[in-house]
Amino acid sequence: MKNLKLTMFVNLYGLLKIPLVLFVNPRVVEAGKERFEIKIPLSYRTKNHLGSMYFGALGIGAELSIAAAAVVAISESKQKIDFIFKDFTGQYLKRGDGDVHFICEEVDQVHALIEESKTTSERLERKMKGYAIVPKTSPTEKVMTYELTLSVRNRSFKA
């Protein structure tokens, strides 16, 4: 039930803030204190001319696995905290020829960054890592690794 609520939350956030996220039809598979997993189905919308997941959809999934954790932490903080990604690095290791699961195992670091931002109006940044798998093919073989710099700023403080 929690994953269903988070999936609806992610899709609503996508609808209101970033409609392209909604286009790839993401689903929350797991949302824990240390791990966040998002699934993007391989479909007409997300596949390339070779029948594997288009790298743009892979980028959305990578970003979303960290962003969804940040949005949850920010909503729990009850403060006006903005976030953006400063940079993105991705290594595409294998074709994503099925539904791709994007996994961030640094959720505790996302929460720590949001907690730290509650005490300052300065922009704070931290590099976050994740990886993607295609469970249908292999539940352990990575098809992609990625690293994004999460940048947050608390606007609750008066300038």
Image: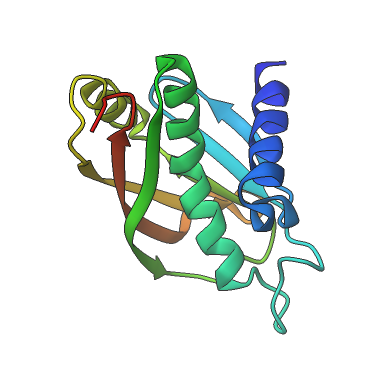
Where residue 87 sits: x, y (%)?
31, 61
The outermost residue toward the bottom is 49
Q: In the image shown, does 144 or 7 lie closer to the viewer?
A: 7
Q: Residue furthest right?
A: 44
Residue appearing at x 23%, y 33% in the figure? 159
What colour scheme was applied to this rendering of the protein? rainbow
Q: Which quadrant of the structure image shows residue 124?
A: top left
The residue sitting at 52% across, 46% down in the picture is: 64
Left or right of 64 on screen, residue 4? right
> Is the residue 145 above or below the residue 26 in the image?
below
Quadrant position of residue 147: bottom left
Q: Position of residue 129 (x, y in %)?
A: 32, 48
Which residue does the image show at 71% across and 50% down from the upper left? 22
Residue at (21% x, 24% y) in the render: 116
Vertical comparison of 34 with 159: above or below: above
Horizontal relation, residue 152 to residue 61: left or right? left
Q: Would you say residue 151 is visible in this rendering? A: yes
In the picture, measured across the screen, residue 93 lies left or right of residue 118, that is right
